[in-house]
Structures are given as C-alpha cells and as structure tokens.
Amino acid sequence: MTILPGSTVVVKNQSSIYNGYEGCVQRISGDKVAVLMDHHTPWDKMITFQMKELEEKTTGFQYYPPKKGK
C-alpha cells in the first residue's frame, strides 16, 4: 500500500515512544513523513517519522475515509 498525504497511519517502531499511535499524514519529503497526531492522542502535534516507521491503517477510524463505490 502507498502512504500519501491524507492517509491514516500507525507508528510501528518498538523503540519509539509513539509506537502504536495513529495520525494523519500531512506531507512527505523524501523518506521523511510529517504526521499530525491529534484525534487519537492526548496531545495535538506534528511529528516527523521515517517512512519505514509507519504503516497505513485501512480499517477502523480514517481521517479521510474512501469514497463509496471506489
């Protein structure tokens, strides 16, 4: 799956304090991804991760759910 701006992602890095938290991708530059952590976290902040630390979330809550019929 491809991670694009607007995608809902989960942090998958056992050594990160953000492991397991969900956020919305705001921008991508090279291998760096800016993720807005707001809805499912105790704070509102933007954090930069490496692409390999993230996994796209396709079930449950979605910041921008897919349109019906697509």
Image (tube, grey):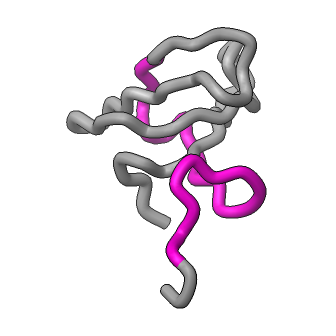
**30 lies left or right of 7:** left
Residue 51 sits above or below residue 45 on the image? below
- Magenta stretch contains residue 4: no
- At a point 58% along the width and 34% down the height, the residue shown is 23
| Residue 46, position as x, y percentages in the image | 45, 17
Observer-nearest residue: 63 or 46?
Answer: 63
Q: Nearer the viewer, residue 29 or 66?
A: 66
Q: Position of residue 12 (x, y in %)?
A: 67, 36
In the rendered image, the vertical position of residue 2 relative to residue 55, given as above or below:
below
Looking at the picture, how far across and down is residue 51, in whole percent?
43, 39
The quadrant holding residue 48 is top left
Q: Nearer the viewer, residue 40 or 33?
A: 40
Q: Residue at x 42, y 62 (%)?
A: 2
Side (left or right) of 58 relative to 6: right
Is 66 covered by the magenta stretch? yes
Residue closer to the observer: 63 or 23: 63
Determine the residue positioned at 65% across, 40% down.
10
Span of residues in magenta: 47-67
